Image (cartoon, rainbow, N blue to C red):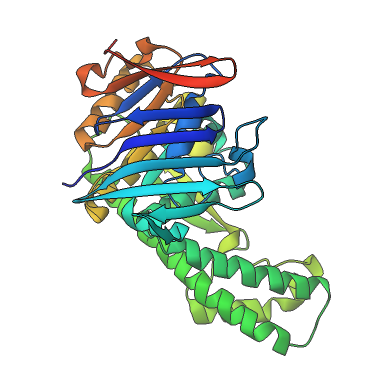
């Protein structure tokens, strides 16, 4: 099994970090400190080493340290399987993020080829009770970790759908305006659905093969308008036949953008949305671990895991079980908590950093095992 980890992370004018440098050796990294010290900002910085807008989905200008507003810079050494990459990204004021890998300009999708990053943050605790949009976002993050090209298919689909929705709102009835857009939507939509099903199959297999202390949910996809058309031709037909109905609604009502992720806890016979808060957290942890196990087999190395305040809603037994599974997997997990006592189950298997904030600047100091 290969290794995927960050061995160096340098931050400049990123959120609460004016300047910071963290060295890591591939073991899990436990960060503790008071609320507001800047722990989650470190995890967000690591999340930027994957395609997309990171774990907070922030715009580039929102990441710049205030009040200076100079722009920001992140750089790191990424060990990926048997290669080592130098990764640098920055955003000047008023500009989008620029990326360089091994001193060559690169598109964000290139990060998906050299790294896999998964995260679990407190806002996701409401995943099973919030609107379907949050679950689709969670689903597509899982898919993107397995199929890096998924982002491109999603962008093509959403751009074509926006144009089709504009025609619908303008009550444009000439079918020739719709045909090219619906062909693009059907082609990209079919790829999106195929990618999602591949990811769910990989995660299901990883769940079945594992011995874990966490509940194993059965995942499935549902569609707001009934069954999603199975393939490209069926989706194109459904879009064409649904124009009149869509025009009345002013938007497209059929397609992968209307899919929802369903989770069922077979052992208890309940849907995830009906489980307790602690059970829902355990189900989320289970999914992240299953995703990681599937990636370890598919990519050749376990992903980098970002677990923000992971101890919340986990009792001591499950917390220890989580640490054991992370270490058995061989994953570099970056974890945060308010105190060192939350990480006593890790012992010498992890690195420890105490994060503090003084005069509006975050700092990190290496500590020994608690």
Residue visible at 39% across and 29% down in the picture: 21
Q: Determine whether 368 is above or below 130 in the image.
A: above
Q: Foreground residue, 274 or 295?
A: 295
Question: Residue at coordinates 53% horizontally, 79% vertically from top-left?
Answer: 234
Residue toward you, 120 or 304: 304
Residue at the image position 58 percent from the left and 81 percent from the top: 183
Please state, as top left, top right, bottom left or bottom right, where the C terminus lies in the image.
top left
Where is residue 213 drawn, in percent x and y?
Answer: 28, 29
Q: Residue at x 29, y 35 (%)?
A: 332
Instruction: Give 120 or 276, whichever is nearer the viewer.
Output: 120
**Residue at the left extreme, as displayed:** 1
Side of 324 where 113 appears, left or right: right
* Residue 347 percent across, percent down from the top left: 23, 16
Camera sees residue 336: yes
User: In the picture, residue 77 is in which quadrant?
Assistant: top left
Q: Is residue 158 above or below residue 36?
A: below
**In the visual, does 4 lie left or right of 88?**
left
Q: Position of residue 292 (x, y in %)?
A: 31, 43
* Residue 312 showing in the rendered view: no
Displayed quadrant of residue 353:
top left
């Amino acid at each position: 099994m290969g290794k995927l980890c960050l061995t160096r992370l340098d931050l400049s004018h990123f959120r609460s970090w004016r300047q910071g440098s963290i060295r890591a050796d591939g073991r899990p990294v436990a960060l503790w400190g008071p609320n507001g010290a800047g722990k989650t900002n470190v995890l967000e910085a690591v999340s930027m080493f994957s395609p997309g807008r990171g774990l907070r989905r922030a715009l580039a200008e929102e990441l710049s340290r205030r009040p200076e507003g100079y722009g920001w810079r992140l750089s790191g050494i990424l060990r990926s399987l048997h290669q080592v990459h130098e990764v640098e990204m920055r955003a000047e004021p008023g500009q989008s993020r620029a990326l360089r890998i091994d001193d060559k300009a690169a598109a964000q999708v290139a990060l998906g080829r050299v790294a896999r990053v998964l995260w679990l943050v407190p806002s996701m605790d409401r995943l099973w009770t919030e609107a379907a949009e949050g679950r689709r976002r969670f689903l597509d993050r899982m898919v993107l970790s397995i199929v890096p090209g998924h982002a491109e298919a999603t962008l093509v689909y959403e751009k074509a759908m926006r144009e089709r929705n504009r025609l619908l709102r303008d009550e444009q009835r000439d079918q020739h305006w719709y045909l090219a857009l619906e062909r693009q939507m059907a082609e990209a939509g079919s790829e999106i659905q195929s990618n999602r099903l591949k990811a769910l199959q990989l995660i299901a297999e990883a769940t079945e093969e594992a011995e874990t202390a966490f509940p194993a949910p059965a995942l499935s996809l549902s569609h707001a308008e009934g069954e999603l058309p199975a393939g490209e031709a069926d989706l194109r037909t459904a879009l064409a036949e649904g124009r009149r109905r869509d025009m009345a609604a002013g938007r497209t009502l059929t397609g992968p953008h209307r899919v929802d992720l369903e989770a069922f806890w077979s052992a208890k016979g309940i849907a995830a949305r009906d489980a307790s808060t602690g059970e829902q957290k355990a189900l989320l942890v289970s999914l992240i671990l299953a995703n990681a196990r599937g990636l370890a087999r598919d990519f050749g190395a376990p992903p980098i895991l970002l677990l923000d305040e992971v101890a919340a809603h986990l009792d001591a037994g499950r917390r220890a079980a989580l640490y054991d599974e992370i270490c058995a997997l061989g994953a570099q997990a970056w974890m945060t908590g308010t105190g060192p006592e939350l990480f006593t189950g890790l012992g010498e298997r992890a690195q420890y950093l105490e994060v503090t904030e003084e005069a509006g600047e975050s700092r990190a100091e290496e500590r020994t095992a608690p």
